[in-house]
Image (spheres, rainbow, N blue to C red):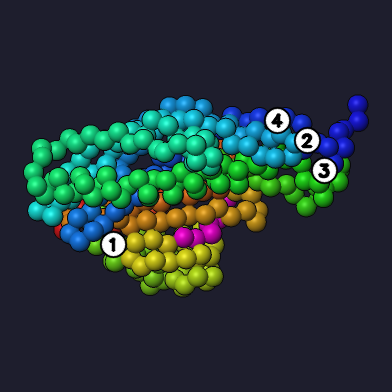
Amino acid sequence: MSSMPLSTANWHWKNKNVTPWAKSWFESQLTTIEIKEGEEVVSITEVTDVDGDVELGQRKSKLITIYDCSVSLKWEGTASDNTKVSGKLTIPEVSHEITLDKLSDYVYNWSLSTTLSPAVDKLYTLAKKRFPAALETKFEEFAAALIDTHGKDLQVNPTSSAEPSRTGTPTPTAAPVASSHRLWHPADDLFQMLTDQSKIPMWTRAAAQSKPEPGAPFSLFGGGVKGTFVSLEKPGKFVQKWALASPTWPSEHYATLTTLLQQSSDSTKVVFALDGVPTGIEDEIRRNMEGYYIQGLKSIGLGTAL
């Protein structure tokens, strides 16, 4: 049987279920949200549940996101009087119809776990005021990431030939891989420890190349990890194009590593979120992130109280 003409291949209905990828995306991306105002700071610490289905469809050459999820979160913060505050938040519907079609508004169901006081109530009010906008920005990013990550699996490239590509095909990627840990050290010092060429060998125990400016290359673990800096927002965030020198990592393929340093009154939460990991090696990469990055930093005393 002859193959379908490339000009019409994209005009037939196709569907791909990506629910596991979506759950991992929410878990890694929503926990990067942190709000600061004066002495108050509040952040999303955990995605406890994502209930629903997520699919990407194609009809008549158009990619269509199809999803309807309930997302449940835990949040924590520090009030102006240093009281530790925590609570829960559920968004009962995160869907194409709300995010893209704007057919209705998001609903936020809040709960507070900490005993109420004036300072606690002020922080609670801050969370309810600022979290929705930050979350809705992430929900917009989710719809775009869904298409960017999985669209190539559904559409036929009309410029390609019917013969297999001799220059390689796009690497299928899995859900983002994330790793985080709370370190008892200021964010500014950790930023330098992770980007300064003279300080990196202290925790990697290997030669490093790093010039922390956009477009500059970096190399860690004696060349085991390489890439370039994309952006830096000292001391809270930097983004890198990232590749692993390993037989399991496709040649010339780069993922995107976002490193967040979320400082509170007594510690800094370090989040490594790696997007674009080749399918099938997610567990290997997660173990490496934990073993080399997190344990490396802890090995020089950054995981102990000051």
Residues tagged 1 and 3 counted as in contact (Cβ below 8 A):
no
Q: Which residue is mark 2?
A: 11
Tell me the element at label 4: strand
Check residue 51 for magenta coloring.
Answer: no
> At 30% from the left edge and 33% from the top edge, which residue is drawn?
109
- In this rendering, does residue 223 appear at all? no
Tell me the element at label 3: loop
Say which mark, if any, is on residue 14: 4
**In the displayed structure, does residue 304 sit left or right of residue 145?**
left
User: Quarter-wise, where is residue 163 in the image?
Assistant: top right
The secondary structure making up most of the magenta span is strand
Q: Quadrant of the N terminus?
A: top right
* Type of amino acid at the residue the image marks with label 1: Ala
Q: Quadrant of the C terminus?
A: bottom left
Q: Which residue is mark 1?
A: 187
* Type of amino acid at the residue the image marks with label 2: Trp
Residues tagged 4 and 3 counted as in contact (Cβ below 8 A):
no
Residue range (magenta): 239-247
- Judge the density around disc 2: few (<14), some (14-19), many (≥20) Cα neighbours within 10 Å: some
